[in-house]
Image (spheres, helix red, strand yellow):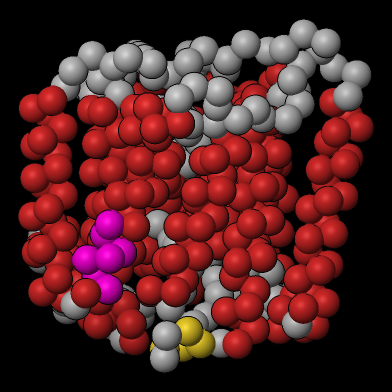
Amino acid sequence: MSILTIPQTHHLQPRSQRWLTLLILAILMVGTIALSIYGWRQSVLFLIGVLFGISLYHASFGFASAYRKLFVYGEVKGIFAQILMLTVATILFAPILIRGSVLGHEVTGAVFPVAVQGAIGAFLFGIGMQLGSGCACGTLYTIGGGSSMMMLTLLTFCLGSFWGTLTKQVWSGLPQTEPVSLIQLWGWSGVAIQLLAFLMITFALWLWQKNRDQEVIPQASSSNFLNSLLYGPWSLIWGSIALAVLNWLTLIIAGRPWGVTWGFTLWAAKIAQFLRWNPANSEFWSQGGAAEALNQSVFADPISAINLGVIIGAALAAALAGRLTLKKPASGFAVIGALLGGLLMGYGARLSFGCNIGAYFSGIASTSLHGWLWIAFALLGTILGVRMRSLFRLSN
């Protein structure tokens, strides 16, 4: 059986970017110290975000690209890596979520309603991540790697998610259930059911792929471990395990799993407030946790701290790999696709209670049924989004 050759994304002996690396390390140090004003947890979450960024960049861990490769080329390695990530995270999350507390503070999973609006939002997100050529975390770590186009995606992602908060009442009347998870329903038996579902999906994909002329299971890196750890590339296997462990640490420190979109929403609201927007005119922003977050510094927000850490971590990984350079958009059509994709992802994420991280990764790791609904409809949106890429002259 021949093996699909995947081009390496890093040099084994990277060209020196010593001064850039030292500058990023200095920024990292200053950021860690500055965030300690808001408590030690904020600094730790920032550093966890840095490790997320390093892991995502060195493993080239893509959600949007993995789904595109599945539908265009029938390649399943990226999907197998996600299943491994979800399996490890589910096993790590379960004891903490069943107990409901850790280190003396309450812990909650990413559990939200199974809702019609969630299905619509996930479908829109699926289209958006193909037009924008990235997902929520992908936007952050590719910005860290020097992508100028992803800055445009981030801009409209923020706008779309903020817009979603202002139109919340439009969707509130659609059918939905109470938030429910398999752990809440059946405890450890619910965890076992989810792990069995992973096994069945893996087996079905393996059967589908076994006669195809491709490598099915992602391979571990064969290069020197320490050299690979610092400079990359990492295998998808190690990347998926690293992301699961870091999400587990986020759950322990923050009391809830990793999320991304809320940070984008808050950033847009802060800018709108600076431009004289009055949050009292919005039901969403005039009460509860949203109002409290709006009245505090953005650096006090745990998700924002992680998001900033992801960008810096990816920049550090890119500099270590000798690949931190500013990358221009491929074309004007690609810019339009990035803008539209970000808008769809932002709005879709607000409708569906999260993005590919908060709803899919953290939701399923929390055994939330809404996470399974999310990925089902996001994949449907992906099918349409892949077909639409040619309109913006985006290659597959």
Magenta residues (range): 41-47
Q: Quadrant of residue 326?
A: top left
Q: Residue at x 83, y 51 (%)?
A: 199
Q: Could you tell me residue 384's position as x and y percent?
A: 65, 32
Secondary structure of the magenta portion, mostly?
A: helix
Q: Residue at x 65, y 74 (%)?
A: 94
Q: Could you tell me residue 330's position as x and y percent?
A: 35, 14
**175 in the magenta segment:** no
Observer able to see residue 137:
yes
222 in relation to 173, above or below: above
Say left or right for 368 vs 189.
Answer: left
Q: Quadrant of residue 82?
A: top right
Which of these two is toward me, 381 or 4? 4
248 in relation to 282, above or below: above
Q: Residue at x 52, y 80 (%)?
A: 108
Q: How many marks?
A: 0
Say left or right for 126 vs 226.
Answer: right
**42 in the magenta segment:** yes
Query: Which quadrant is home to the C terminus?
Result: top right
Observer able to see residue 297:
no
60 in relation to 353, above or below: above
Residue found at the very far top of the displayed protein: 2
Residue found at the very far bottom of the displayed protein: 104
Q: Residue at x 26, y 28 (%)?
A: 320
Q: Could you tell me residue 121's position as x and y percent?
A: 57, 55
Query: Which quadrant is home to the N terminus?
Result: top right
Q: Could you tell me residue 71's position as x and y percent?
A: 71, 27
